[in-house]
């Protein structure tokens, strides 16, 4: 069985830099996503706080936990 891919937009709050439609699998941990985002933003994963927002910009989850998988947050493409 293949892992489900979702496309998400990453935004660095301090700089406003955005990476659109970044693909991740739902079985990736939040920590793995942060490590990947380091290469885009230059901020250490240890200093990142990921927030999940809906299509309207409303915060759905304000502090995604490193040990949880992306799919835990019921994210959809």
Image (tube, helix red, strand yellow):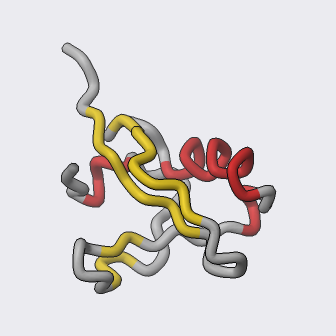
Question: How far across and how far down the image is residue 77, in percent?
Answer: 21, 50
Number of dots carrying numbers:
0
Give left or right: position of 3 versus 61: left
Question: How far across and how far down the image is residue 51, in percent?
Answer: 46, 73
Question: Which of 16 and 61 lies nearest the eye of the viewer?
Answer: 16
On screen, residue 37 above or below 3 = below
On screen, residue 71 above or below 47 = above
Location of the N terminus (image quadrant): top left
On screen, residue 40 above or below 26 = below
Question: How far across and how far down the image is residue 16, in percent?
Answer: 62, 76
Residue located at (24% from left, 81% from top): 56
Using the rendered view, name the quadrant where residue 57 is placed. Answer: bottom left
Q: Residue furthest bottom?
A: 58
Residue located at (33% from left, 46% from top): 7
Give left or right: position of 54 versus 40: left
Question: How far across and how far down the image is residue 52, in percent?
Answer: 38, 70
Give left or right: position of 6 versus 52: left
Using the rendered view, name the quadrant where residue 32 is placed. Answer: top right
Question: Which of 17 and 27 lies nearest the eye of the viewer?
Answer: 17
Question: Which of 56 and 45 lies nearest the eye of the viewer?
Answer: 56
On screen, residue 21 above or below 58 = above
Question: Which of 9 and 43 lies nearest the eye of the viewer?
Answer: 9
Residue located at (75% from left, 61% from top): 46
Residue located at (24% from left, 32% from top): 4
């Amino acid at each position: 069985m293949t892992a489900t891919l979702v496309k998400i937009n990453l935004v660095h709050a301090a700089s406003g830099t955005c990476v659109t439609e970044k693909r991740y699998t739902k079985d990736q941990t939040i920590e793995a996503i942060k490590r990947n985002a380091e290469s885009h933003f230059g901020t250490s994963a240890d200093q990142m706080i990921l927030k999940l927002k809906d299509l309207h910009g409303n915060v759905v989850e304000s502090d995604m936990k490193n040990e949880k998988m992306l799919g835990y947050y019921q994210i959809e493409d």
